[in-house]
Amino acid sequence: MVKEYFVYIMASRPHGAIYIGVTNDVWRRAEEHKDGTASKHTKKYRIDQLVYYEVFDDIDAAIEREKQMKKWNRAWKVRVIEEMNPNWEDLARPS
């Protein structure tokens, strides 16, 4: 069985506060953000919408990508979100 790892971006709303993280289960992690158990920061700022993710088969590559993205300026983060998800829809919620 191939392991999957995810770099993901959560947002409070379109163009609102964002959070970048890494996990081995993006759907579980998104639910943890929604129910407020993921982190104090995302709970405080209500960052609970999954707006972007990338899939990796190597944890080290996923961690490196997360670190890289956290250093980006906001415009680059917005651009990568909007390339995948132009309407900032919550990808963890069925349409």
Image: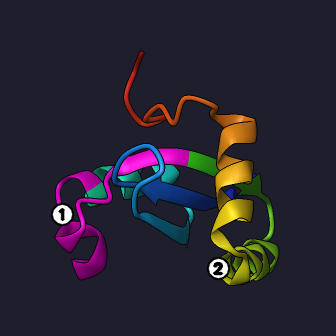
Which residue: 63% across, 68% down? 74
The amino acid marked with disc number 2 is Lys
User: What is the count of numbered marks?
Assistant: 2
Q: Is residue 59 left or right of residue 70?
A: right
Image location of residue 52, percent across then percent down:
60, 47
Decide which of 95, 71 is in the foreground and name it: 71
Residue identifier under label 1: 36
Q: Which mark is residue 70?
A: 2
Residue at disc 2, secondary structure: helix
Identity, as a three-letter code, of the amino acid under mark 1: Gly
Q: Quadrant of the C terminus?
A: top left
First-in-chain label (2 vs 1):
1
Measuring from the top left, give residue 89's x and y in whole percent: 47, 31
Q: Is residue 62 above or below residue 56?
A: below
Residue shown at the point (32%, 59%) measured from the top left: 47
Q: Secondary structure at mark 1?
A: loop
Left or right: 62 with respect to 87? right
Q: Position of residue 86 (x, y in %)?
A: 63, 31
Nearer to us: label 2 or label 1: 2
* Residues rendered magenta in the picture: 34-51
| Left or right side of 81 for 30 | left
Q: How is the image coloured?
A: rainbow
Residue 82, position as x, y percentages in the image: 67, 40
